[in-house]
Every structure is written in C-alpha cells, then in structure tokens.
Amino acid sequence: MASNDRYPNVIVVLTTQWRGQSVGYAGDVNACTPFLDSLAENSIDFTQAVTPHPFGVFARAALLTRTRCPENGISDYYDSLPPNARTMAHSYQERGYDTAFFGKWQLYERDPTSPVVGEAHARIVVPEERRGGFSFWEGFESGFLLNDGYYHGTRLPSPIKIPGYQSDTLVDRFSSFLNDRTSQAPLFSIVSLDAPHPPYGDNASGIEPQSVESISLPKEVPEDETICQAARDELFGYYAHIEATDRAIGRLVDRVKARLDWENTIFVFTSAHGDMHGSHGLFRKGWPHEESVRVPLILSWPLEFRKARRDPLLISLLDLGPTLEAFCFGEAVGDQGPKSGLDLSAAIRLKAEGPEYQLISMPSSPPFDKQCPYAWEGRRDWDRTQVVGEDGQRFTLDH
C-alpha cells in the first residue's frame, strides 16, 4: 500500500496488437510515440513483459479474471466470459473503489456466422449483468470499427453511432466521466482500445501514414520480395494508428492529471498481444514468437517510484491483477492457485526475485486467415542477457 495509506487510483490502458518492439523508446525508428517516450522516461518500462495468450479474447479474459484460459471459462474464440466470473472489478469494489470500464469488451456472446469486422458485432448489447462487475461500463462488444463506432452502456442504453476515431472517442468519453464524477472514492478503470489492430488502412485520426517504401523492416523479416511488400503494406498503416493512439493516450493522461491525484495514481500502459508483420515469414498473432508474445508495459506511480528504470522483470498480463491489488491493499485478494497470476509487487520494489519463466499458450485455433492454425503450449524464459544495470536497476545474475 502507498506509504500514506491512501488507496491509489488505478488506470489501465489496454491496446490491441501493439507489439513490445513498436515504440520509439524501444528503438523502433518507424514508431512516432512522443508521449509514451516521455512517460517511459519517468516510469518503469518492463522490457520483457508478455501476454499469457497472444490472441485478444484469451488475453483479455486472463487479464480481467487473473486466471489462465481455459480455466477461466474461455477456451474458444467465440466463448463468452461466464456470468459468475470474478474479475478485478470485484476486488476493487469490495475495497470501496469506484470501478469503470471503457471500450472494447470482446467477452460476450457473438454470432460466429456474422462478419467479425463491422456493425453486427459492434452493435451487440452487453447486458449489465455481463459487464464483469464494473459499476460503470461504456463501450462496445467488438466489431473492430476504428472510426465512427457504436457505443452503449451506463449512460447509453442503446448503441449509438459516435463519429470520430475510436481512440479519440474513448478518451473523450472517459474524460467526460471524470468531469461528471463527484465521488471521493479512489477509482479503478480500464480503457480498452482496438488500435493499432486491423483494418490497418483505416483513417488514423488524420495522421498521414509514412510512405510504404520508407518503412524499415527488422532483420527477422525474410528477404523475400512478396513477404517484404506485404509487411510494408501493413506497417505503414499500423504505425499511423500507433501515432494517433499515442496522441490520444497523452490527452487521457492530461485529463487524469487535471481531475485525479496523479502522484497517487498507478497508471499502466500495455497491449493484449503483438503482431508478426512478416517476421519469420508470418503474419498476425497467436504464434509462439517474440513479435506476437511480447507486449509493451509501462507502470507509473510517482508517489512510490520516483526513479525511472528499464526493468527486465519477466512479467505477464496475468500478473497485473494480483500485483496491482498488492500495491493498493498490501496483498493480492483473489485466488492464488496454480493457474492464477503472480503477485510481483515485491519484485518490482526490488525486494524479491522475479519468475524464471512464464507459461504462454493458445487454447485453440481461431478460424481466421493468416493466424496461427494450431493450439500450443510453451514457456517464455527470462532473458538474462538484458540483466545489467545501475543504481536502482535490477541486476540479478546466475547463482
């Protein structure tokens, strides 16, 4: 718990398909991310953060429930979160928090015969009792409408079309929620964004994409003309959505600083999974490779962590729930079984070792082109080559 015993606010920004390599502060020359670069300069940047399942439905369910798939009830792409599922929202509400969710849900019942991209899934109404226990909920089931999407929830009984870029719209909706809020209770909120998920060619809030020819490809992309061209055709739009969403997240943080106690706010930026973009000759996600598995993860809490650092702690999205609870309440309050996430709060405070490995799996094969066509299980081992540092950085060695 914070040293002054005030429960901190907790704000988690969860993006989609934003791989850990694709930010300016990680050295990607294609990525224009000035806000996140500045945030990383004052925060903890977890350089080996991973997703437990490199596909959106599974990753989101694991994050919310703090339990691996399929043990949390999600074993297939079209499964919905069980009505009795316990989520992070329940833990915070039981401690007196206000809880709020904004954006992409992707955990309710969907028609597998309807197009995945489009209005059919975007206009599905998620009933109040299936919103994961959040006291305030405003967003959409799915549909991947990066522009002019449909939104419903606590203030919007039926789906309405709101013009504009999705990341901007959700930041605006979150901001208006903060402006209208009169409660003095601490706030736990998740802001869930589609970007930079396909369709990559959609308008990115007016950001002019780089030319296809100017995109620099990593060495993992084979020197095959067809693969290289396909990768560049994706990446020029991908990086435009990254730039637009970086800008939107900057506005969100400005609003948090204006309306909440930023010093005692835990702010997390991360993604559900990455994307291959031609690396190893593969595209999309679900594959057992770094580009699909490793995600960006920045944690800011000025009251507790004054010194920024790049930390190679091997942390999974599965660990965020119990770790954040431990920061807030002094202990993780949910299930600590073998299929649950780890409380890594002591490791983040540099008072304990982190895990040697993280279990990662694809419970089933989603029925889409380009995606990984098989289920698999594996483990991501800690990369010790990164473990050197100075004054406050982790430098645990083999012993």
Image (cartoon, helix red, strand yellow):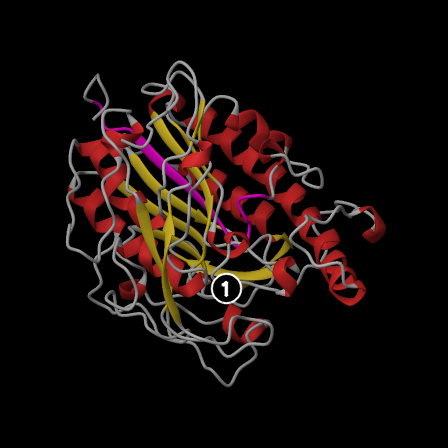
Where is residue 332, by image quadrant? Answer: top left
Judge left or right: residue 45 versus residue 245: left
Q: Does the magenta stretch include residue 155?
A: no
- Is residue 185 something one can see in this rendering? no
Residue occupying the far top of the picture: 391
Counting from the top left corner in percent of width and height, residue 79 is at 35, 74
Where is residue 248, by image quadrant? Answer: top right
Measuring 82% from the left and 46% from the top, which residue is drawn there? 214
The quadrant of the rendering that contains the N terminus is top left
Q: Give the range drawn in magenta.
A: 6-21
The quadrant of the rendering that contains the C terminus is top left
Q: Which residue is under mark 1?
A: 287
Counting from the top left corner in percent of width and height, residue 115 is at 57, 79
Badge 1: few (under 14), some or many (20 or more) residues near its Cα, within 10 Å?
Answer: many
Counting from the top left corner in percent of width and height, residue 312 is at 41, 34
Judge left or right: residue 372 versus residue 181: right
- Is residue 91 something one can see in this rendering? yes
From the viewer's side, name the closer residue of 123 and 338. Answer: 338
Judge left or right: residue 37 versus residue 125: right
